[in-house]
Image (tube, grey):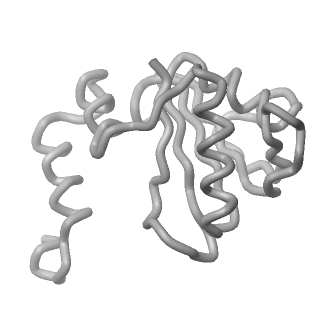
Amino acid sequence: MTICALSTGIGASGVAIIRISGPETSFLIKSLTNKALPKPREATLLELNNINNSRLIDQGIVLWFPGPKSYTGEDMAELHVHGSKAVVKELQETLLSTKKCRLAEPGEFTKLAFLNGKINLLQAEAIGDLIAAETEIQME
């Protein structure tokens, strides 16, 4: 199953990153942009539209990472968009409305990376520790 989630913090910000991973990623990116997939690992500025009504949601950077050469080992993409709550909400809702993806559980992208042999258990645990770090000592 394809998953999606906000990878940046919740709340208004200058930039928000929505990550998508799984077999339907290419379909979702083509549906959002009404364009062919961008070149792999090349930041591409594209309009992102509501899949249901073609209304423009935002213009943002799309990064396409075909599997297995991605963080999760699956087809994966990142949408770098303006970080308003409205933009993030509408993008997530339009992705979920296709029934081709679901919201990721906390840590699920890293779990996929581990299960697909992209990282080992020690690296997966280190990522969790780094994300939770509040002090410089905790980052070490």
**Image location of residue 88, percent across then percent down:** 62, 56
**Image location of residue 117, percent across then percent down:** 26, 24
- Above or below, 35 against 124 in this view is above
Q: Residue drawn 69% across and 66% down?
A: 82
Q: Residue drawn 54% across and 32% down?
A: 76
Q: Quadrant of residue 111?
A: top left
- Above or below, 115 against 134 in this view is above
> Is 61 on the left or on the right of 109, as rendered?
right
* Residue nearest the viewer, comparing 118 with 96: 96
- Above or below, 48 against 70 in this view is below
- Above or below, 6 against 117 in this view is below
User: Which of the image's four quarters has the C terminus?
Assistant: bottom left
Query: How many discs mark residues in the rendered view?
Result: 0
> Is 113 on the left or on the right of 68, as rendered?
left
**Image location of residue 58, percent across then percent down:** 80, 57
**Image location of residue 101, percent across then percent down:** 53, 26
> Is 49 on the left or on the right of 114, as rendered?
right
Q: Residue drawn 25% across and 23% down?
A: 115
User: Which of the image's four quarters has the N terminus?
Assistant: top left
